Image: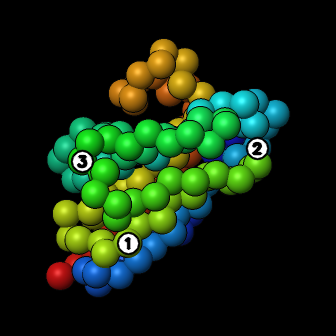
Amino acid sequence: VQLQASGGGSIQAGASLRLSCAASGRAFGTSSMAWFRQAPGKEREFVAAVSWTGGSTYSPDFREGRFTISRTKNTLYLQMNNLKPEDTAVYYCAGQNIAGSYVPSSWKFWGQGTQVTVSS
């Protein structure tokens, strides 16, 4: 599986962005996929995951409804609304949860990351 993230940018607080992650490889269709993010000086943190059947799981920090994860056959998405300066981070897509956990080490494949910068 190869992952290519895109859609980041520099925006004002309150705006929306949709991140995409294009996946190649036969394993994508039956793999869980996820979004993580890493802010400057902080560890990479789990945002949300979606199973190959479409069921989603969100980190408790992202359950207020501003972020929505979804997928099609070959692409993973993260819709982000009402963005805040504290959402500034590099966002990474990940695939194939090999350990059944939502820590970064549990995921086998990673995209290169896309930068999101939110200014106040």
Q: Which quadrant would the C terminus be assigned to in this image?
A: bottom left
**Does the CB distance between marks 1 and 2 fall below 8 Å?**
no
Question: What element does badge 2 sit on?
Answer: strand
Q: Amino acid at mark 2?
A: Ser
Please identify the quadrant where the N terminus is shown: top right
Is residue 1 in view?
A: no
Q: Are there few (<14), some (14-19), or many (20+) residues within 10 Å of tag 2?
A: some
Mark 3 and mark 2 lie on one chain; the one further toward the N terminus is 2
- Which label belongs to residue 24? 2
**Residue type (three-letter) at the residue carrying disc 3:** Asp
Cβ atoms under marks 3 and 2 closer than 8 Å: no
Q: Percent x, y for residue 38?
A: 31, 48
**Identity of the residue drawn at 59% across and 35% down:** 51
> Residue visible at 35% across and 81% down?
15
- Tell which residue pokes out farthest to the right in this image: 26
- Residue 64 position, x and y percent, is 28, 57
Q: Which residue is mark 1?
A: 81
Residue annotated with mark 3: 61
Residue type (three-letter) at the residue carrying disc 1: Asn
Mark 1–mark 3 Cα distance, whole angstroms, equals 15 Å
Asked whether, in this view, residue 24 is left or right of residue 45, the answer is right
Q: Is 85 or 32 nearer to us in this picture? A: 32
> In front: mark 1 or mark 2?
1
The Cα atoms of the two marked residues, 3 and 2, are separated by 30 Å
> Is any atom of residue 19 visible in this view?
yes
> In whole angstroms, how far apart are the C-alphas of marks 1 and 2?
27 Å
Residue 117, image x and y in percent? 31, 71
